[in-house]
Amino acid sequence: MSSELDSKAPIATLTASVRKTFPSAGRNFTLDVGFSAAAGFTILFGPSGSGKTTLLDCVAGLVTPDRGRISIGESVLFDTGSAINVPVAKRRVGYVFQDLALFPHLTIEQNTEYGLTHLAPHARRERAAAMLHELRIDHLSQRRPAEVSGGERQRAALARSLVTDPRVLLLDEPLAALDVATKSRIIEDLRSWNQKRAIPILYITHSREEVLALGENVIVIDDGHIIAQGSPHEVLRAPLQETVAQLAGFENIFDATVESVHEDRGTMTCRLLAYETENSVTLETPLIRAEEGSSARVGIRAGDILLAISRPVGLSARNVIQGRIVSVERRDMIVAARVNCGVEMEVHLTLAARDALQLEASREVWLVIKTHSCHLMQH
Amino acid sequence: MSIDWQAFWLTIELAVLVSALLLCIGLPLAYWIAFSRWRWKFFVEAAVALPIVLPPTVLGFYLLVALGSQSPLGRWWQSLTGHPLAFSFAGLVIGSIIYSLPFAVQPFAASFSSIDRKLLAASATLGVSPLRSFIRVIIPLSRAGIVTGAALAFAHTMGEFGVVLMIGGNIPGVTRTVSISIYDQTQASNYAAANAMALLLLIFSFAVLMIVYGLNRRTLNSGLWTTGAVK
């Protein structure tokens, strides 16, 4: 960072450790997390109900933790130790909600000026106009939220938060409903806005693609706890925890036993066990620290498996397995085929591949799986 | 036809004053009812709703006791103004406020409760205090409920009879309202005058309600007042 930037806006890291229990009839839910987020995007990734939104609510001050400490740089927002609880309106934490919560009775311009009452009217108008220009919605300033498109509303909600110069920005899946192109344009504009400000941005998402596209830092939350943290590559490509694996899009997860270890080749042979039947299949997988005969789990992405209608030869891939198609099902623009090859595996193909190979149930096929497409994980 | 214009204008004055005061008292009270998490809140809600179920004579009787020259309030008022509170216009205003309280507060509270809490959360995260959020978000978005509450309080006060009779009596120019006047004329078998007054009250009340419903319909059907989430 340049010294000029430092003098303007000292880069403040968000640090939070939070514990909050919600009593409920069936089972108490406890959010218990500690993390810090530097300038730039930090992705909060996890299944719904895992506590991501509650965490953002705690940072914003909308939910009061049972205990913990939340600070931005030197400034403490919440601390049970010293009984500090800064009111929401004084935290300067920008929050864009999942449903945006734009004020329906105000125009986009009035929405953007809403948080600027401390300024004189002309300064307010100038700041709002500049912000709307930066987010490319200045032509919509006189419209109401219900009169603009979804993407434009997201931009308006962003403008309304960003214009107040927040010290931290919280985004709760604000772009979930948008198409990929619109989404990535908004992200780009947000990135360029944050080039100057360099504030921490906490971004909640369910989408694996967004994690890979956005993340400098990913925090995976499940059932109120942080189960993994790091770069998207670290967290998603080599998952250790099964929850992460399911989140990361492993359609195929199998219990397995290690049959033999080939230290010299850097591989192992694992026997995958079929669910509820005696069948099994052996695969060559990457080497991990495991004893022969020990149990493991293997995850394989449905998109990483090749499918052939005759036995392929001369391949580098170590796993070529014969099987039979159980079902072929179209899902949006992909085709999901379930193949029984001792265990049942899901394979994803394009529509064109399905038609070219004339895939249908009961057809005999061969699956091709590279050693390094087999991900071993702990459970 | 002889219309008791004095009673008519007195009634209008009373109704306008009561509606205005009920806006001042009712809006904060309704805010508290809509947003408080106090566990004994239902106690206050029940107390506010009491005038709906009580016979006006019961309410009027207790108000008379509370406002009379023997009561602390009555004594305090007398020492302050030199006049007794009961059987005065001021006493009538106090009685009418309590009598019409639920008709104002319940529509206010209902419309406040229906506001998306996320809007208030958004307002707070934008650095705006709860009081300013009330003025800038809750009030404009509750316009229909506020207009309804104020109009109901106005109409209810225009037509009240039992409470007025109990605490105000029938003093021309001070406490004689239209409904008392109609009762008076009927008792005196002066049906033409009673009919004129009754018709005037009917037309006036109908006009007020038409205006209110007309205004609210425009607000609700404009289609612009949705939060605009993408779903």
Image: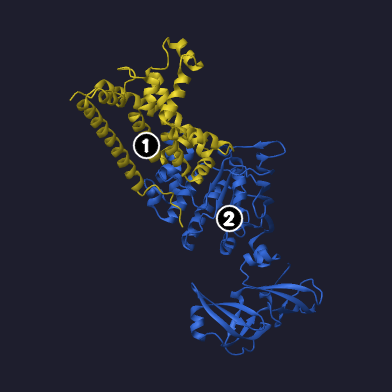
Dot 1 falls on a residue whose secondary structure is helix
Give the SS element for disc 2.
strand
Q: Nearer the viewer, residue A24 or B3?
A: B3
Is A260 positioned to the left or the right of B161 in the image? Answer: right
Q: Position of residue A262 (x, y in %)?
A: 79, 79
Chain under disc 1: B
On the image, the x and y values in percent for residue B7 come to 28, 22
Q: Colour of chain B?
A: yellow
Frontmost residue, A181 versus A69? A69
Q: Judge left or right: residue B12 versus residue A181.
A: left
Residue B197 shows in the view: yes
- The quarter of the image holding the C terminus of chain A is bottom right
- Residue A365 image offset from top left, x and y in percent: 59, 87
- Residue A62 vs A352, above or below: the answer is above
Q: Position of residue B87 (x, y in %)?
A: 39, 17
Question: Does residue A379 appear to the left or right of A92 in the view shown?
Answer: right
Q: Local crowd at mark 2 within 10 Å, few (<14), some, or many (≥20)?
A: many
Q: Are marks 2 and 1 on the same chain?
A: no
* Chain A shade: blue
Q: Which residue is mark 1?
A: B147
The dot on residue A204 is: 2
Question: Residue at coordinates 62% horizontally, 59% vertically from top-left?
Answer: A46
* Chain where mark 2 sits: A
Q: Quadrant of residue B88?
A: top left
Give me the C-alpha separation between circle 2 and circle 1. 41 Å
